[in-house]
Amino acid sequence: MLFWHVPAPNEALLISGSRRRSQDTQFRIVTGHGCLVLPIKQKARVLTLSLRESEIVEECVTTQGIRLNIRAVAAFKVGDDPVSIANAARRFLDEQDRMEELVGRIFAGHLRSIIGSLTVEEIIRERDKLAQEVKDGSHGEMEKLGIVVDSLLIQEIEDTTGYINNIAAPHAAAIASQARIAAAKADQEATQREQEAAALKSEYVRDAAIKQAGFTAEIEEAKAKAGQAGPLAQAQSSQEVIAQQTLLAEREAQLTEKQLESQVRRPADAEAYRQRTLAEAGRDTTKLETEAEAFKQRALAEAHRDTTKLQTEAEAFRQRGLAEAQADAVKVEAQGEAAAKQAHADADAYSQRAIAAADADALNARADALNDGNQALIAANKLVDLLPALVEAASKGIAGSHLTVLNGTEGVNQAVAGIVGQGMAIYDTLRHSVAQESPPPSSNGAKPADAGAAGTASTPAHE
């Protein structure tokens, strides 16, 4: 129909003047179906969505300062979404034929900036990375233009300075060297194979000649055998006889050897082994006995040494104990003798005092008795005269004995007091005996007072 427009699959129909708008655009976008366009009131334009190709040839400088001529191809198209179509329509609707040139300039600018940050080696080794970085760098601008980049390929890198050739020169030289080495190895292997083939050929010729000579010799031998069949048979028979005899002699020699081995060598080996074993056993026994005797002597020496040491220490300890005991005994004996001498001196002094006191009392009593004529007192006076003799006899009995005084001076005083007490007891006993044996009072009229006086006079003597 005249007013009905249908866009192709790779086209977008842009209708301006319509009241219906697509999102924020001022015109209506139709793709994939037809629509009615009113004349005069509306206007329809077509924007192609086909794939476009832009060839980029640009001179770039690397980070090393080397100039490279880069040839690349970018495949792009207008996006299928309404926003991309609207952006592309506003910018390229009247200049759709120049779209490749404009997009190529944008890619060329990004290509120069990215190559300026790379080295030649990185560009050569990572072309895909370079293309991806160019695509990523131009993505924002392409999106504003409504362009979708399908692919970007680096086709060729030209180096006017020869840097790339110089980089490849060592590798090319190494490859050339490897090629020459491989060719030399191939020639060497070929020559070796040819020599081996020639050797095999010569060996085959030699083997053929040898076989031919062998065949000829066999023919001649057969002819000779045929001519000497009789003598050969006889000689062969003799030879067989000799062979049998030789075999018999060898068997007899083997039998003799086995007999010698079983009867002589093996017993001799056994006897030698026995003697060797006995000698080794004797040697080991002697060694063990020697070691045991040495150990015994060492043990006895150590025991004797320890015993002597213990005895010496015990004797020294005993001598020290005896010396200490003797010293203690001498000390105690000296102390005892000193104490005994002191006690004897004290006893002599005490006895002298006691005798003197008794003599004085006796003299007083004797005087009183003589004055009063009291016979009893006279007898008592006689006892007093005998008292020193009694005390001296008691002292002589004690002087020859060994006394042990336990309480020092106090013990000596107690012993002396005991001796004096015994003497006084003897004196009292004798006095009482004399008093009982004395005659009654005389008739001259002695007064009882005189007896009382005599008793009074006797009291000091008792004391």
Image (tube, grey):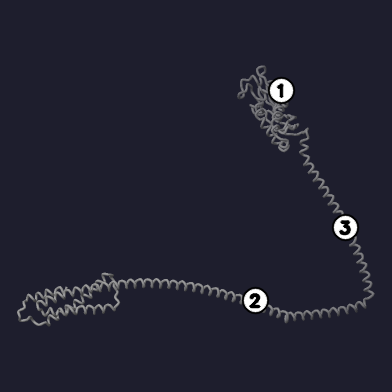
Which numbered marker is on residue 95? 1
How far is the residue under mark 3 from the one under mark 1? 83 Å
- Residue sitting nearer the eye, 383 or 136: 383
Q: Nearer the viewer, mark 3 or mark 1?
A: 3
Which residue is the extreme one toward the top? Answer: 40
Residue 224 placement (x, y as % from top left): 94, 73
> Does residue 273 appear left or right of residue 358 in this picture?
right
Residue 369 placement (x, y as % from top left): 11, 77
> Does residue 393 appear left or right of residue 63 in this picture?
left
Q: What residue type is labelled 3?
A: Ala
- Classify mark 1: residues with Cα within 10 Å, few (<14), some (14-19) or many (20+): few
Q: Earlier in the sequence, mark 3 or mark 1?
A: 1
Which numbered marker is on residue 264? none
Which quadrant would the C terminus be assigned to in this image? bottom left
Q: Which of marks 2 and 3 is nearer the N terminus?
A: 3
Q: Are marks 2 and 1 in contact (CB under 8 Å)?
A: no
Q: What residue type is labelled 1?
A: Glu
Residue 34 placement (x, y as % from top left): 67, 25
Q: In which quarter of the image is residue 442?
A: bottom left
- Classify mark 2: residues with Cα within 10 Å, few (<14), some (14-19) or many (20+): few
Q: Which of marks 2 and 1 is in front?
A: 2
- Classify mark 3: residues with Cα within 10 Å, few (<14), some (14-19) or many (20+): few
The residue indicated by pointer 3 is: 199
Q: In this view, does 115 lie above or below 91?
A: below
How far is the residue under mark 2 from the one under mark 3? 67 Å
> Does residue 168 appear left or right of residue 444 in this picture?
right
Q: Quadrant of residue 413?
A: bottom left
- Residue sitting nearer the eye, 3 or 147: 147
Which numbered marker is on residue 280? 2
Q: Which of marks 2 and 1 is nearer the N terminus?
A: 1
